[in-house]
Image: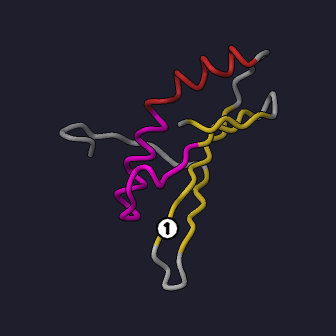
């Protein structure tokens, strides 16, 4: 739930860093995209379009792991151009 709204989604891949006791210290969400983008401007526009989805992933994962949202890194993996964009 996001407020009073039901949100549904599936993480493509999540990497979690843990301390020696298993407590989550941070995490990275990798979301694979098959969009074709011919240049950096097109990639930036796609990243802008995917931002709400990725923010939902950050919020959900931070709640699931008991982490501050700032400890969850978001990365879009664009398969066609072979580029990875970190959303800040």
Number of marks present in the image shown:
1
Q: Neighbour class for label 1 at 10 Å: few (<14), some, many (≥20)?
A: some
Residue 17 against residue 82 in the figure, above or below: below
Q: Is residue 86 rendered to the left or right of residue 52? A: right
Q: Secondary structure at mark 1?
A: strand
Q: Can residue 14 be found in the magenta stretch?
A: no
Quadrant of the rendered image containing residue 81: top right
In the rendered image, residue 87, in percent from the top left (x then y), is placed at 56, 36
Q: Nearer the viewer, residue 83 or 7?
A: 83
Q: Can residue 64 be found in the magenta stretch?
A: yes
- Write the residue at 38% across / 56% down: 68
Q: Is residue 44 rendered to the left or right of residue 18? A: right
Q: Which residues are magenta?
A: 53-74
Residue 82 against residue 18 in the figure, above or below: above
Q: Residue furthest left?
A: 4
- Write the residue at 27% across / 42% down: 2
Read off the residue under disc 1: 25
Residue 16 against residue 57 in the figure, above or below: below
- Write the residue at 81% across / 34% down: 82
Q: Is residue 6 rendered to the left or right of residue 83? A: left
In the rendered image, residue 63, in percent from the top left (x then y), is placed at 34, 57
Q: Nearer the viewer, residue 36 or 43?
A: 43
How was this image coloured? secondary structure
Quadrant of the rendered image containing residue 79: top right
Q: Is residue 79 rendered to the left or right of residue 20? A: right
Q: Nearer the viewer, residue 13 or 51?
A: 51
- Write the residue at 61% across / 53% down: 13
What is the magenta segment's predominant secondary structure? helix
In the rendered image, residue 54, in percent from the top left (x then y), is placed at 49, 38
């Amino acid at each position: 739930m996001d407020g009073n709204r039901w949100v549904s989604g599936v993480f493509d891949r999540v990497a979690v860093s843990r301390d020696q006791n298993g407590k989550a210290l941070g995490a990275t969400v990798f979301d694979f995209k098959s969009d074709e983008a011919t240049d950096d401007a097109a990639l930036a526009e796609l990243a802008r379009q995917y931002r709400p989805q990725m923010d939902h992933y950050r919020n959900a994962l931070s709640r699931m792991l008991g982490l501050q949202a700032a400890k969850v890194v978001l990365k879009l993996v664009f398969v066609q151009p072979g580029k990875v964009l970190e959303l800040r």
